[in-house]
Image (spheres, rainbow, N blue to C red):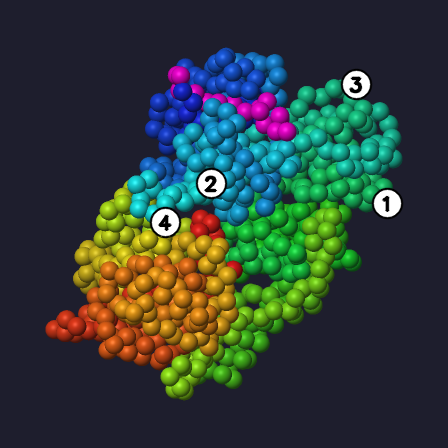
């Protein structure tokens, strides 16, 4: 078990200690992270300069030659240092997360010691547990994790067991134990800072995926893959009917060897050698089909169709050659109008389960692993590229025209009729034009003429698919990964956001339906805040969502401790530069650990970030607190209360509920309660807030200083006056009134706080596991 991992694991060292890890890629080549090389050479970890030929790195294969140090030097053509953005070479700020590049290949002076073997590689599989060894290679300090989301350039993994993630795992291989293959390189981790008052949370591990490595280092020789077994004999049999002469076999082997950067056997080549080359490396089988087509250009008929089917059985997740994939990824880098998650849902409406992806390249990697079902002529991969091209054509000719050309060339090699590709593209355009016309007609009937321009824009950007997609082709066919059966799609719809009856018997409020945009459509900034032990300095990450079809984007990660004023400055900058606030003010959500729910983030302000004076978050923007960690025990309660949210009642926890057992009993007795008013002495607030979280309550309103029956009655009036989706705006206006009435020191809005963890919007995809449990 795991012997291929141990035989290929490399420890990267600085004099007598291990600083990181790597993996044997070839007999004389080691793949690792560039920042590990920098650390081993005593340089700044984000140094971008190429190490000189005189700068040697010490490496060791601890499971093969544990007492022997080797010297290795950086391969100049395969040095990709860390950089801040995908394009250009801007340096990475110290300690920043989510950077690009950070890859290096070390060349050994000769073959690795006896017993060492290059590692096999495969793309990661969601749900498959992986392990990572510490720099020393010792099997005891091992981290176990599960890939959760691919957010280029990294993959986020949930740590599920093993040792603590710490310095020294970087550069090491992520090993899939089920498939016995490397699926990425460890690059960073995310965890609760040391010294924080809350218990240490399991880290989120970040890795560079195999497709990302191949895209970043296009000159990298194709890595090995686990020896293929299924379909190999069928592949040999069908090739015998196509390559019928020794010259044809030899020509195909020479061409394939050159494409895979492997030596050719020349006259000694046979079909076994040819197939062995193809099935032994990444994307070798698609390269084999391309070579056969070039050597036998007049081929066709049933044996060619059989060859394509057998090739998919041998290599089910690969249909593109390395060059085709590189060309496509180069074009996708210029595409920004298509939401990857929506693309998957549109092309694969009946798929059993789709992975979480946030990049177009990753989305198309997923589509490449699916087959067209039934009589559908278009494979999902080509459907996805066509849809991206249609989206991009609305912005101009490039890269839409190049995507169209790439699709037609690839369709020919995949045996897809080009006429079917063009018809599919025409159907997509026609469907969207019909949607736009229908939306405009509806607008003319429903809106004032001055609103028509905005309505046309909304219809233009709304490309979400419905059941009507059956007319275009893909949604009418059940899609499933190769080897699985398609399933029927369940007819589902969004939960109603209609008016909820008030508990005091008053008429249902129209808030949430006619009082402005629904909260789920309002742009927002989401801040994961990690306080230090003192609670006066903070580290944080900031995500932005500008509404509509825009994806979540991680726009800021500050790992150095700063004051609350700097936090507000950064939020204000994100609001100005990233968020389109029209017509509603953006929502600012602070994700806090349970121990810090009482942090007065809604009162924070900055004195320099606004030209009109101090910028106060709490009254200029809707500010709410959400729980950054919800246990599995509380998750069931959260779901139950969420299901009844629109008709839920309110509950007051006053001075008679400060005993934790009493509070828990009251919450257990009233599982339909959705909103809780905490109104007691401030010293009890923290315990009651944590009790509400544990009971699954998602909306809590409290006054930080005052309490008593009159205060409780006033807060109940606020809660019961409208739909729950309007509550953040109601609280914001109360805070604004308190600021406007400067002479009144007792206005209830001055110290008003709201925890709002209702299901109005998904949290960022790259967030740690703690956020996953806050949203089903």
Q: Distance between the residues labelled 4 and 2?
A: 15 Å
Q: Residues within 10 Å of mark 3 (few under 14, many from 20)?
A: few
Q: Which of marks 2 and 1 is nearer the N terminus?
A: 2
Q: Distance between the residues labelled 2 and 1?
A: 48 Å
Residue stretch in magenta = 1-16
Task: State the SS at label 4.
Answer: strand
Front residue of 540 and 320:
540
Q: How crowded is mark 2: few (under 14 residues within 10 Å), some or many (20 or more)?
A: many
Q: Distance between the residues labelled 1 and 3?
A: 29 Å
CB contact under 8 Å: marks 4 and 2: no
Q: Residue at x 55, y 56 (%)?
A: 341
Label 4 vs label 2, nearer the camera: 2
Q: Distance between the residues labelled 2 and 3?
A: 47 Å
Query: Which residue position holds label 2?
Result: 205
Residue 621: name its quadrant.
bottom left
Query: Which residue position holds label 3?
Result: 268
Q: Is residue 3 magenta?
A: yes
Q: Is residue 307 above or below residue 730?
A: above
Front residue of 444 and 280:
280
Query: Which residue position holds label 4?
Result: 541
Q: How crowded is mark 4: few (under 14 residues within 10 Å), some or many (20 or more)?
A: some
Q: Earlier in the sequence, mark 1 or mark 3?
A: 3
Q: Residue 302 carries which label?
A: 1
Quadrant that contains the N terminus: top right
């Amino acid at each position: 078990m795991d012997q291929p991992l141990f035989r290929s694991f490399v420890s990267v060292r600085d004099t007598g200690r291990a600083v990181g890890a790597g993996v044997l890629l070839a007999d004389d080549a080691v793949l690792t992270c560039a920042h590990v090389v920098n650390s081993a050479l005593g340089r700044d970890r984000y140094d971008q300069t190429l190490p000189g030929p005189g700068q040697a790195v010490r490496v060791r294969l601890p499971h093969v030659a544990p007492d022997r140090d080797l010297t290795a030097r950086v391969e100049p053509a395969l040095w990709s240092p860390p950089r801040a953005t995908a394009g250009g070479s801007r340096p990475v700020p110290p300690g920043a997360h989510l950077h690009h590049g950070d890859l290096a290949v070390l060349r050994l002076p000769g073959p690795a010691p006896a017993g060492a073997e290059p590692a096999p590689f495969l793309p990661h599989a969601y749900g498959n547990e992986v392990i990572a060894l510490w720099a020393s290679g010792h099997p005891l300090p091992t981290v176990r994790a599960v890939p959760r989301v691919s957010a280029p350039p990294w993959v986020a993994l949930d740590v599920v067991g093993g040792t603590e993630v710490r310095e020294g795992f970087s550069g090491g291989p992520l090993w899939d134990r089920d498939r016995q293959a490397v699926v990425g390189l460890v690059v960073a981790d995310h965890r609760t800072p040391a010294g924080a008052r809350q218990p240490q949370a399991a880290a989120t591990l970040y890795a560079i995926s195999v497709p990302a490595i191949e895209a970043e280092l296009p000159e990298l020789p194709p890595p090995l893959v686990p020896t293929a077994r299924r379909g190999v004999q069928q592949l040999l049999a069908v090739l015998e009917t196509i390559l019928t002469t020794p010259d044809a076999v030899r020509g195909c082997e020479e061409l394939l060897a050159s494409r895979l950067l492997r030596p050719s056997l020349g006259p000694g080549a046979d079909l076994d050698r040819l197939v062995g080359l193809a099935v032994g490396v990444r994307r070798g089988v698609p390269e084999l089909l391309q070579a056969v087509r070039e050597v036998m250009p007049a081929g066709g008929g049933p044996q060619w169709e059989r060859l394509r089917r057998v090739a998919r059985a041998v290599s089910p997740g690969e249909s593109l050659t390395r060059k085709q994939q590189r060309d496509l990824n180069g074009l996708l880098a210029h595409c920004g109008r298509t939401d990857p998650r929506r693309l998957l849902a549109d092309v694969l409406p009946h798929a059993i389960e789709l992975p979480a992806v946030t990049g177009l390249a990753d989305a198309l990697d997923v589509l490449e692993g699916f087959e067209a079902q039934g009589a559908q002529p278009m494979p999902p991969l080509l459907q996805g590229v066509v849809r991206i091209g249609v989206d991009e054509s609305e912005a101009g000719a490039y890269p839409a025209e190049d995507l169209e050309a790439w699709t037609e060339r690839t369709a020919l090699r995949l045996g897809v009729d080009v006429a079917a590709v063009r018809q599919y593209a025409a159907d997509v355009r026609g469907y969207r034009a019909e949607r736009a016309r229908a939306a405009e007609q509806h607008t003319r009937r429903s809106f004032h003429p001055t609103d028509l321009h905005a309505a046309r824009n909304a219809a233009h950007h709304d490309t979400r698919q419905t059941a009507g997609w059956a007319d275009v082709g893909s949604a009418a066919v059940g899609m499933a990964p190769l080897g699985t059966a398609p399933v029927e799609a369940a007819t589902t719809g969004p939960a109603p956001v209609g008016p909820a009856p008030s508990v005091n018997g008053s008429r249902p409020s129209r808030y949430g339906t006619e009082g402005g945009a629904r909260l789920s459509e309002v742009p927002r900034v989401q801040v994961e805040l990690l306080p230090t032990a003192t609670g006066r300095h903070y580290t944080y990450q900031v995500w932005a969502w500008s509404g509509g079809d825009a994806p979540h984007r991680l726009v800021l990660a500050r790992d150095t401790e700063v004051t609350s004023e700097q936090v507000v400055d950064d939020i204000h900058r994100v609001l100005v530069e990233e968020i389109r606030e029209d017509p509603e003010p953006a929502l600012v959500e602070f994700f806090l650990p349970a121990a810090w729910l009482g942090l007065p983030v809604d009162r924070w302000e900055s004195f320099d970030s606004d030209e009109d004076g101090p910028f106060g978050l709490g009254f200029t923007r809707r500010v709410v607190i959400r729980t950054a960690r919800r246990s599995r025990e509380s998750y069931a309660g959260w779901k139950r209360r969420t299901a009844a949210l629109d008709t839920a009642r309110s509950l007051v926890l006053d001075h008679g509920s400060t005993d934790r057992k009493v509070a828990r009993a009251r919450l257990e007795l009233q599982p339909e309660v959705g909103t809780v008013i905490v109104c007691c002495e401030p010293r009890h607030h923290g315990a009651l807030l944590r009790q509400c979280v544990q009971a699954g309550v998602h909306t809590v309103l409290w006054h930080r200083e005052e309490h008593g029956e009159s205060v409780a009655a006033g807060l109940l009036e606020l809660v019961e006056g409208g739909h729950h989706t309007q509550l953040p705006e109601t609280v914001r206006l109360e805070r604004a009134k308190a600021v406007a009435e400067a002479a009144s020191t007792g206005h209830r809005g001055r110290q008003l706080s709201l925890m709002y963890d209702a299901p109005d919007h998904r949290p960022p995809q790259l967030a740690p596991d703690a956020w996953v449990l806050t949203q089903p």
